[in-house]
Amino acid sequence: MRLLCLHQNSILRRDDAVERIYGEKDYFLGRSFDVFISRLRKLLRHDPRITIENVFKVGFILKVTEEGVE
């Protein structure tokens, strides 16, 4: 969550996050990271101001808006 917040409203590259969190790039560690993102989305789904969007084959963007509308 900290990495997403540090990259708020910009792309957090998936490979960079996996390497920073787990210390290495690995397919299975990457899948664990994806599960973590999925769980974060579930926790945050009730707040319309916060979304975590996928950037296909790149990473994720934590978007935070004032009133849930960009």
Image (cartoon, rainbow, N blue to C red):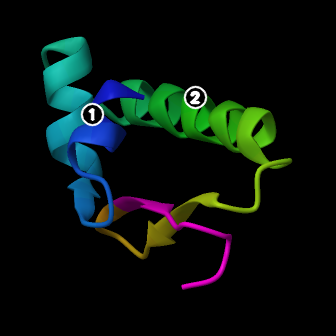
Report if residue 21 is visible in the image. yes
Q: Quick one: 14 or 3, which is closer to the camera? A: 3
- 43 relative to 52, above or below: above
The label shown at residue 15 is none
Q: Residue at x 39, y 24 (%)?
A: 29
Q: Residue at x 71, y 31 (%)?
A: 39
- The kind of residue tagged 1 is Leu
Residue 62 shown in magenta: yes
Question: SS class of the residue under badge 1?
Answer: helix
Residue 31: where, in percent of width, then height? 50, 35
Residue 2: where, in percent of width, then height? 32, 26
Report the residue marked by disc 2: 36
- The kind of residue tagged 2 is Phe
Magenta part of the chain:
60-70
Report the residue marked by disc 1: 3
Instruction: Find residue 1 and report its image quarter.
Output: top left
Instruction: Find residue 6 and report its image quarter.
Output: top left
